[in-house]
Image: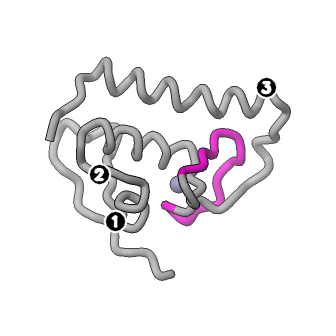
Amino acid sequence: MRKLTIDQTAAITAVMRLFAEEDLAKGVSSNQRMYCDRCGMPKPLPGFVGYSTYKLCNDCSIQYELARAEGEVNSIEEFVPSGKIINLDSRRRSSQGRLPPRLA
Ligand SMILES: [Zn+2]
C-alpha cells in the first residue's frame, strides 16, 4: 500500500471539493439533501459524485479517491460495502477500524 504525501492528499481533497463548488455555482442548493450510498447520511446535494450505480456524498467521495490512490481499494464496488474509513484528521496516526456493515 502506498502512502500519499500530505500534498497529494490535499490535492485530491481540493479537486473533490471543486465538485461541490461547481454544483453550488450551477445553482444546486445546499439545503437539498440526498442519502449517500456509503455513509447512509442525508448529505448536502452539492458535491455528490456518481460512481457506477452509487452516489456518494462529497466526504465519502474524498475517502474513496484517497483509498483508491493509496491502493486500498480498486473499485467503487469494493469501497462502498466495506465501510473502510480513512479519518482525514488522524489518518497519519494509526489505521482506523472498520465501521460495522450497514444494514441493507
Ligand atoms: Zn457519504
Q: Earlier in the sequence, mark 2 or mark 1?
A: 2
Q: Amino acid at mark 1?
A: Ser
Residue on which disc 3 sits: 25
Quarter of image, res 40: bottom right
Q: Amino acid at mark 3?
A: Ala
Q: Residue at x 60, y 49 (%)?
A: 50
Nearest the eye: 69 or 103: 69
| 38 sits to left or right of 69 | right
Task: Say the numbered circle drawn on residue 6.
Answer: none
> SS for tag 1?
helix
| 2 sits to left or right of 102 | left
Percent coordinates x, y for residue 71 in the rendering: 24, 43
Task: Say the numbered circle drawn on residue 82.
Answer: 1
> SS for tag 2?
loop
> Residue 47 in magenta?
yes
Question: Is 36 placed above or below 32 here?
Answer: below
Q: Residue at x 35, y 38 (%)?
A: 66
Residue on which disc 2 sits: 73
User: Separation of disc 2 and disc 1 at Cα?
Assistant: 9 Å
Q: Residue at x 29, y 51 (%)?
A: 73
Give the farthest residue toward the top: 7
Quarter of image, res 62: top left
| 26 sits to left or right of 101 | right
Label 3 vs label 2, nearer the camera? 2
Q: Are marks 2 and 1 in contact (CB under 8 Å)?
A: yes
Nearest the eye: 67 or 40: 67
Q: Amino acid at mark 2?
A: Val
> Magenta span covers which residues?
38-51
